[in-house]
Image (cartoon, rainbow, N blue to C red):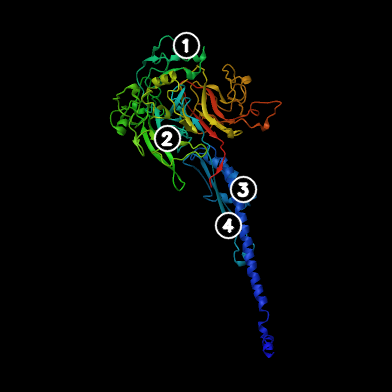
Amino acid sequence: MNRIKQPLQRKQNADPRQKGQSIVLIALMMVAIIAFVGIAVDVGFIFARGSQLQAAIDSAALAGVVELSGWSEGASDAAALENNALTKSAQFLNANHMPISVTTSLNMPGNVAVETTPLGATQYAVTATWPVDTFFLKVIGFREPINLTRSATAAVFSLADIYASRRVEDGVLSTSNQAVFGPQICVNYGDPFSPWNSPFDPDSYTYQYRILVPDDYPDDILRVELFDPDSINSSVNDHDVTLSNIALTNGFTQPVVPKTCGADGGSIYQKNPCLLRTDEKSLVTGTPFLDIDQVNPYWFVRIDENRGTGGGNGNGVCDQPANGDYVARYNTRTEFLLYYFRQNADGTIERIDLVSYYGQTGDQRDVDTYGGTPGDHNTDMRWVSPGADISFAYDYDPNPTGPDVPATPLQIDSFEIDLTQDVPGIVRDQSSNARYIFLDVTTLSGASENGFEIWAGPATYTSSIASDVNLRNLQVLNTPGSHSSKGATVFGLGNLPMNSNYADNNTDINPVDIPLLYVGPEMTGQTIEISMFDSDAGAQPPVIFYFDSIAFTPDDGSALGYDPDLTDWAMAFGVSGQDDPDGVAEGVRCLPGSCQANGSATGPNSGWVTPAYQIEVPGNLDKCDYNNPNMFDCTPFYGGILTARYTGGQNDTYGWQIRIEGLPYLVK
């Protein structure tokens, strides 16, 4: 019994100073618990603010990048577009209830960046910082706000894929061709970007093309052909012109007709183009009213223009030789460079240059580059694939003795690309699985105009289709389908330098339909911006835009240029006596034929149609009043080719520029 009482007695006799220790421990534990709870609350609060900031900066990037449609580094309007993007981003931050400190953080150095990606998209990166005050963390010493920084990068692809040719499928030269001028000319001659003194885009003197190779392309080889890549002109004026089969079955009696430059089209001077009239166009403008693609309107003799003046060893300045003079050193030297984009294992995209060709000029520059004699490649008025085993077909000569056309190897040695070996890791379109080969066209010296054309497709026609432009035109016309690209399509990226061939003289009003770009149904309600540069030399208004998939009936006898009763949708610009259909008042824009460039970067005499034509893609039926339907609000749209109907002038060099208000997307 005593053994039981002793412990109780010891407890009762304990030191009174030890009493209450548990309360202290509990109090200390409560402080720690509160601190941990406070940390958890503050950290959760910070994470919530971070998510809020990320969502806001994502929307700010997406909103801002839309304002950069048409942006290019160094362009005259680049700073204004960047400022518009910054303003729009700030507005979206405010709309997402961000404090003013977040909005002003956009102005910090390096927090906004704009660039063009290698694939041509405009990329816009935005960074913002939010100083977030804490509550419980201040107890343990974190008295300053926690700076949360979040970034987002958005992109928009606003460069339109413009069809490089009306006959891009079969490689026929007809109503127009590509044309660039040498760097030592001025923009007044019709090329806004190649001249070194261009005020429009001082950092880029290159026209960029891309060749779409569809997923179902049936061949391993893609043969890229250039028509007349040199700037050399023949001096011969007398030619025997062979008529097409369809002409001989529609009243023409002589299969071969002698024609002379000057009397039958073009100029007698070697410095000027010469397209001989075959007279087959009468079958288009009169009975039996054939389509222009059913006849052969011209016999091509010369398409280049020898331009420039100046003595010494220079390659010319902004002028032209006197009539009768032809100066080879004024001719333009042009580089044609093929490349592709490779996706590396780490996800980065890299440009890989493949092969290049330098078009000849007929003077010492040819010797310096290739050796031999000036102009010895014989590419004038011929289709050629530089570096290929069969550079051109030599027009049925089974034992060709002419010189090959050498290319400058980089990764491969010719313009025939083996798609199974030469382009490893090529980037594919995520939606269509298509591949793209790119081509840069840059003039390096001279002042002349270099007319050319591009075709791409299988290498299966070298023994059956001629390289001579006129023989090829006849072969394809007389035997439809004999020369097919098998789906390979050449596009100009955003800009297309053109030379009009269709008019016979400055009073010949014959509109031609020019396919510009394919527009899918997902573009319904969006805006396409189209401008023209330096449309003069006899071009005529109006310019009519329509879709090949929507009913359209031309009427060249009306002011509109089409029959409104038989047309479901069209937009005609420059119609006398009325405002343009996008709301721009009559007289604000220059009219085709009067858009001469004077070398200035802005204003009505810059050469550009300004403001650009605004084409709203039909199909948004929200505003349709079915009791009073109209073509702009009540026309459904399922996709189609946007086509321009336009009367070009005689040998008028001009340019198309097309930008799409593309849908923005987040990159990261």
Query: Nearer the observer, disc 1 or disc 3?
Result: 1
Determine whether, in the image, residue 400 is placed left or right of residue 473.
Answer: left
Q: Earlier in the sequence, mark 2 or mark 1?
A: 1
Q: Which residue appears at 62% of the width and 62% of the height? A: 40
Q: Residue furthest front?
A: 1
> Residue at position x 66%, y 73% from top?
27
Secondary structure state at the residue bearing disc 1: loop
Q: Is residue 385 left or right of residue 540?
A: left
Residue 269 image offset from top left, x and y in percent: 38, 19
Which numbered disc, 2 or 4, marks the residue closer to the eye? 2
Q: Amino acid at mark 3?
A: Leu
Tell me which amino acid carries mark 1. Answer: Asn
* Element at label 2: strand
Residue 75 against residue 579 in the figure, above or below? below
State if disc 4 and disc 3 touch (CB < 8 Å): no
User: How far, Cα to Cα, is label 3 from label 4?
Assistant: 17 Å
Q: CA distance from mark 2 to mark 1?
A: 43 Å
Secondary structure beneath disc 4?
A: strand
Single out the residue that lies furthest toward the right.
627
Residue furthest bottom as drawn:
2
Q: Identify the mark at residue 440; answer none if there is no mark.
A: 2
Badge 4 is on which residue? 147
Kindly identify the amino acid type of the residue bearing the numbered disc 2.
Answer: Asp
Which residue, given by chain and number where applicable, does mark 1 sit on? 250
